[in-house]
Image: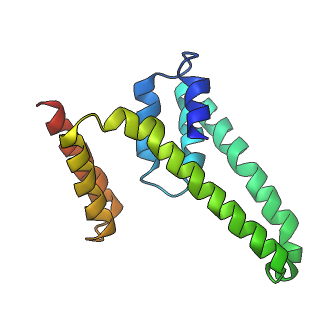
Amino acid sequence: MLYCRYQEFVPAGMVSKEAFLAGYGAAQAVPGPLFTFAAYLGAVMGGWQGGTLAAIAIFLPAFLLILGALPYWDALRRNPKLKEALAGVNAAVVGILISAFYFPIWTSAILNQIDFAFAAVLFSMLAYWKLPPWVVVVTGVIGGFLLSLL
């Protein structure tokens, strides 16, 4: 999905590659990265008005779905077929996120062994040492800057 967005916005000149990757990286620090990323792209292309419109457009369907399903929620959550369908949706989302991680993130960020080692350290900080995400992001920014000086 991210690959599709990249192909739609960057080659068309609507957003620079740097702005696209910076926004996607920043969106990873908050919940719902694809939703906040849509608002970011709207802001890059149309200022604060574009960002506001994109945020409303991306969140409105979910709010309407919640309002429509809320009266039936108890019956829906006990439905075994719905539980299976949601498990499939969850698996699909994980697959999309993995593909988005590979392109354009991995292919544009991991260019040599030092980059790979630094990414492994950042991953370890988050997954094994259980440091807060903001600490990992700040470390990544500082480390990325220092690596760019090499």
- Identify whether 7 is placed above or below 95: above
Q: So how many labels did they put on this image?
A: 0
The residue at the point 19 percent across, 44 percent down is 142
Looking at the rendered image, the quarter that the N terminus falls into is: top right
Q: Residue at x 43, y 28 (%)?
A: 19
Q: Is residue 45 left or right of residue 56?
A: left
Name the one closer to the observer, 111 or 44.
111
Horizontal arrangement in the rendering, residue 39 relative to residue 64 (left or right): left
Q: Quadrant of the C terminus?
A: top left
Q: Outermost residue, front direction?
A: 113
Q: Nearer the viewer, residue 45 or 82?
A: 82
- Residue at 27% x, 49% y: name it: 119
Given residues 12 and 66, the one toward you in this image is: 12
Residue 25 position in % (x across, y down): 41, 43
Question: Residue 85: x and y, percent?
Answer: 77, 67
Residue 22 in percent (x, y) is at 40, 35
Percent position of residue 11, x then y:
54, 18
The residue depicted at 41 percent of the width and 44 percent of the height is: 26
Residue 23 visible, this angle: no
The answer to whether one can see residue 32 in this image is yes
When the figure is inspected, residue 83 is found, relative to residue 106, above or below; the finding is below
